[in-house]
Amino acid sequence: MDPFISGLLTQVPTTINNTSIGDGLNTGGYSFNQRDNHTRDNTSIRVDWDPASHHSFSGTYAWNREELDRPGSTLGLTSTYSPIPVNYNDDRENFLSVAWRWSPTSSFTNEVRFGFDLAPINFLSNQNFGAFTVSDTLFNNPNQNEFPSSRKTHTWSWQDNANWSHGNHTLTFGMQVQRVTVFAEIPLTRFQTSILQVISSWAPAILPAPTISQTRTWRRQINF
């Protein structure tokens, strides 16, 4: 017998404890408890500061952690025989939003905002992958053969908006810049996509606001 197949068979239980599966003669079922934990932690902080009558600062930061077991059924794969699932998620997300509001006079106000959202998602595996994998066996394969993958989405945003009032008229104008970068890792291939969006607008209060939008996209592929 092939040594690799022999090693797989040693991981397959030989005890039948579930008669509802199989024909009861040559095949049978094996039931066991497998961990299916889902842990979430959230931390956030907000700061507001008014150092003077014309200045106002605010900021919000949030941190999220998610740890999730991935039994085979949640990924459309056959469950392994290990008490702890081989596949799992381990993600950390960081969010920040800060603002500065300046009102030098009663008729003019300017507000600057900046923030980012760093949101990765990682599909990880404890399986020890060798030089090759084996699938389509006649018995239940104890290996899921689900390679690790991830997708890291980074969003950066900056905007500056101003408002000026004079008599019965109000003029609003500003600019916004946003960049979104997606770095994806899948088996044997890596992708990176960046999107830069610039939006500027001005508008009197009595007219609809015309908008200028420009989007640039870069895509880079690295095969290894």
Image (cartoon, helix red, strand yellow):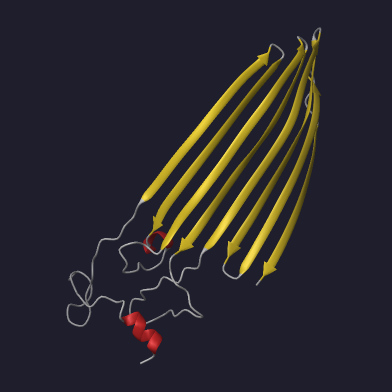
**Is any part of residue 201 visible from this angle?**
yes
Give the quarter of the image for residue 224: bottom right
Residue 72 location, x and y as percent? Answer: 38, 64
Whole-percent x, y for residue 113 in the image: 69, 30
Using residue 197 as the reference point, say whether residue 63 is left or right of it.
left
5 vs 150: above or below: below
Front-most of residues 128 and 166: 128
In terms of depth relative to the viewer, which is nearer, 124 or 221? 124
What residue is drawn where x is 53% and y is 36%?
Answer: 62
Please state which of residues 150 and 17 is positioned toward the viewer in this rendering. Answer: 150
Of 127 and 136, the residue lying toward us: 127
Using the image, determine if residue 205 lies above or below residue 130: above
Task: Look at the image and tell me in which quarter the N terminus lies.
Answer: bottom left
Visible in this render: residue 205? no
Q: Residue at x 31, y 76 (%)?
A: 11
Q: Is residue 95 left or right of residue 207?
A: left
Q: Position of residue 68 (x, y in %)?
A: 41, 53
Indicate left or right for 124 with 111 as reference: left
Location of residue 47 with respect to 94 vertically, above or below: above
Quick one: which residue is furthest to the top in this view?
A: 167
Q: Residue at x 35, y 82 (%)?
A: 7
How many labels were placed on the picture? 0
Can you say whether 90 is above or below 147 in the image?
Answer: above
Q: Where is residue 34, by image quadrant?
A: bottom left
The residue drawn where x is 71% and y is 52% is 194
144 relative position to 174: left or right? left
Residue farthest to the front, as pictured: 51
Image coordinates of residue 127 in percent, x first then y, are 43, 69
